[in-house]
Image (cartoon, grey):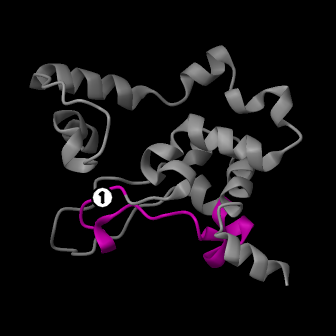
Amino acid sequence: EWMHLWLKDPHAWRQKTVMPNFNLPDNVRTALVEYLSSQKGQAWDKGGRPWQHAELQGDLAHKGEVLYQSAGCVSCHGDKGTGGYKNNNVIGGLIPSLTKVSDGYTKEELLVKIKNGVVSLPADPSAKAPLIEMPKWGKVLKDDEIQAVVEYLFTLAPKSAKKADAW
């Protein structure tokens, strides 16, 4: 349903998006949503997963950053995990920032959360449920790939928090 709404009017969801409104007829939009919904990483298996390149294997956090960008995490959580994109009927009305996940989760807890996905609780249970959910990445990514994303997310902590952690 969210994809239908996005393709109908992208600017209603993300005011500053560069995606134009293509004014697609309903039947074309429906066909496009069906196709896009069926895509679960097949292109990675044909052309190789970009985060598996040899030069990334020595740096788990950098591998996780490439994965974050390539797998689509950036689409909802923003560049460098800044968040702030609209989601209906969630507390605050926005997809959360990931810049402080290290304050609320251990690496193991975050791995499980990413692996199992997240269904947002509605801010108002009597209203329409939130349309955007974090998928169960464990169905698409391997554990070591999710671990790389976790390592990357832990690098996003604000610099002041990193200094405090060093003490």
Where residue 140 appears, as percent x and y from the top left, is: 59, 38
Above or below 153: residue 148: above
Residue at left 70%, top 53%? 152
Mark 1 neighbour class, 10 Å CA radius: few under 14, some 14 to 19, many 20 or more: many
Query: Which quadrant holds the C terminus?
Result: bottom right
| Residue type pointed to by label 1 | Asn
Q: Where is residue 153 in the image (x, y as percent from the top left)?
A: 66, 58
Query: 106 or 102: which is nearer to us?
Result: 102
Q: Is residue 91 left or right of residue 103?
A: left
Question: Is residue 145 in view from this perspective?
Answer: no
Residue at far top of view: 46
The number of numbered badges drawn on the structure is 1
| Residue on which the image places disc 1 | 87
Residue 108 among those drawn in magenta: yes
Q: Give the range drawn in magenta.
A: 85-111
- Is 147 within the magenta? no
